[in-house]
Amino acid sequence: MTNSPSSNSDESRNFERLDPRIQRWLWQAGWTALRDAQELAIPPLLKGDHDVIIAAATAAGKTEAAFLPILTRLGQADEDAPRLAVYIGPLKALINDQWQRLEGLCEALGIPVTPWHGDISASHKGRFLKRPAGCLLITPESLEAMLMRQGSTAAGVLAAADYFVVDELHSFMGSERGKQLQSLLSRAERLVGRRVCRVGLSATLGDMQGAQEFLRPGHADEVELIQAAQGALDLHIVVKGVLEPAVTGKDADEADEANLVAKASIVGDLYRALRGSNNLIFPNSRSAVEFFADRLRRRCEEEKVPNEFWPHHGNLAKDIREQTEAALKQKVLPASAICTSTLELGIDIGTVKSVAQIGAPPSVASLRQRLGRSGRRKGEPAILRGYAIERPLHTQSSPTELLRGNLLQMVAMLRLLLKGWYEPISVSGLHASTLVQQVLSVIAQNGGSNAGRLWEVLCEHGAFGGMPRELFASLLRGLGAKEIIFQDATGLILLAPKGEKLCSHYSFYAAFSSQEEFRIVANGETLGSMPVSRPLAPGSFVIFGGRRWQVISVSTEELVIEVKPGAAGALPNFEGQYGAMIHDRVRQEMRDVLRSSDAVPFLDKAAAQLLAEARQNYHGLGLEKTWVREAGAEVHVFWWMGDRINDTLALMLQALQLPAINHGLYVEVRGADRAGVREALRELSRTPDAHGARFAATVQNKIREKWDSLLADDVLEASFVSNSLDIEGTLAALRVRSELTRSKQAGLS
DNA sequence: GACCTGCTGCGGGATG
């Protein structure tokens, strides 16, 4: 079901269907007209008999689109039998924002609004539980806690629910948190004993069909899609090439120094170009945020001008982040933020003049979100300044350096952005870790359960529909063997003491894992946090929050690092996760850029020169003619696939006793010559086995998610294969390749 | 070889 905007004469009629008190409130608030999405959402949401996704750019009034009709319905309810709308948001800050936005409107209607998350007092929550009605604004974690803790009374709390509104739907898709959310929605509907109207609010990214399937698994075609008309994006792009100075040897310190010189030249460029206006700078890592924040702030001090550059990332304390947000929002002085994806979604920071992207972004979708922050005023273009750092070439240069991998990825992603393509989000996978959480939660909620009921609630009619029945039985047996649960003589499954302990701690409610962290404190004030795995020694220097500090003391008991202002400073080391997963389409676009000889219009002179070298080297390496290339003792497979498929191929080759590494642009293989690798690839392409157990067996550590360590071996293996690999995709790509090779050979002979 | 998110119940002490 799709509904596109139109300028029909129904518009005023739809407005008139809203509660008169809402109409009056909108007039008084100075609204002159409803936007497309707000107009179109009124009829289906007033009815509330089927699910709806409202997709529109940020700040296009998605919240109002959903709540104007929803509040109209709630306002019509009998006073003795008030109804409930449950709004689920990914961030506490977002819930607080929406609370303020909805309060005035709800007051006019006499409808209570209750925010419910970790920072809300128990007394406030208690008040809602006494009279569960109106709008409840909650996080998935708090909803999990409510189901578990309220146990049998949770059914009464949610009994009046007419809507489940999920905000920033795309931010949940594909993750543990998204799976948990789907399971919570399904469990909540089961509690109230009927289907509840689900409403998804989303940015207009990626494939909307995936979002429909995510919102109502198995019934995507019943989800109505409302998409706001989006004007063409007026974009000004320039990508600058930055070449590091040459180094003589292979010394790591010398290489770091060369990289610093390149980054320092970007600092100078940013200072000149961005001062005097509001901008966002995305350097791709928390450590790099610290580097640029420190350098740009010191540059302001040197020039004796007020500082205009502020850091923002997830390890900084709330106070420091709010200071940066406030600097961007106020209109008196110009301000730019150096940030990670924290400023990519959600929080309102006003409009910015330009976006700087240092290094290739992690995905086209993320690049689009970042650009959406710029050029939001009428008649102003969105401006992107890209910087790609590359190294001088020498005889030992790697293929990635020869092909100018960083610049190449930036160019490919920008070309895809201009074509309107974004990565679809994969929502497949068994998510056995999150299923462990849901099993324990359902047992706790009901004070015990049995295998058949758990299967039915969570898998057969729940969010884990892809879980085979035998594997689910194995998962339960595994939890029994690890003494998390036990079965009594009647077949009732109960929590064992270990399981009780797990469930009674507050850390249970989140589906995603997080590491222990040190708090960094200066003069009694918390600056932020650092992973415990990367401790700092007393006396050492560190840059944090864009300033320089010296460590006074480290308490491993209380997990506190005390610091005082310092003269020098080294960059903090935050442990990254597994890195950006580049999509197949991006890699293929990279190959197309190399094959083409057309000038790329948005490159500066240095970048154009670097791209010319890359194109020359593409032919020099013979990649136009062959995809399996010998390089000394190694063989390189250049097949331009994404990281999921590259990772899978590397594992498959390892299962054939050929050590292989995914380098992104290519897969490196050792232990065989070109003919040997070709033969191995041919053999793999004939593999009918899509089960994958024999490939996954070579992986040492398959633990990735929060409760993976509680899984039986066979469940862990199956979950790993389905979440992290793409065996079918890899085999299909191999078959296409061997088909092409065969027909080429036939043509030659 | 990126990033981000979230959390209850209880007991002790201060306050009205």
Image (cartoon, grey):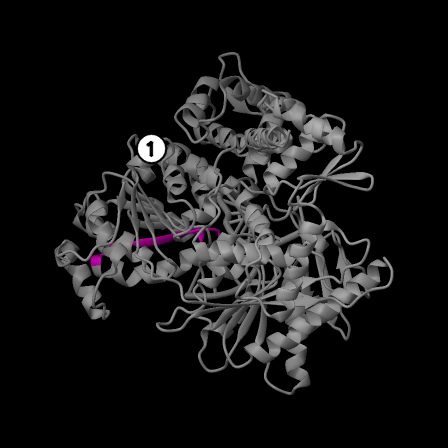
Q: Which residues are magenta?
A: A109-122
Q: Name the residue located 52 percent from the left edge and 32 percent from the top edge.
A: A429
Vertical comparison of A211 with A91: above or below = above
Vertical comparison of A468 with A340: above or below = above
Q: Residues within 10 Å of mark 1 (few under 14, many from 20)?
A: few
Identified by mark 1, the residue type is: His
Say which quarter of the image contains residue A647: top right
Q: Name the residue located 62 percent from the left edge and 70 percent from the top edge.
A: A605
In terms of depth relative to the viewer, which is nearer, A260 or A607? A607
- In percent of width and height, residue A631 lies at 78, 43
From this viewpoint, is residue A712 visible? no
- In percent of width and height, residue A464 lies at 46, 29
Q: Residue furthest front?
A: A749
Q: Which residue is mark 1?
A: A219
Q: Name the residue located 17 percent from the left edge and 55 percent from the top edge.
A: A18
Left of A438 or right of it: where is A125? left
- In percent of width and height, residue A703 lies at 65, 34
From this viewpoint, is residue A300 visible? yes
Image quarter (top left, top right, bottom left or bottom right) of the N terminus of chain A: top left
Give SS at disc 1.
loop
- In percent of width and height, residue A126 lies at 38, 48
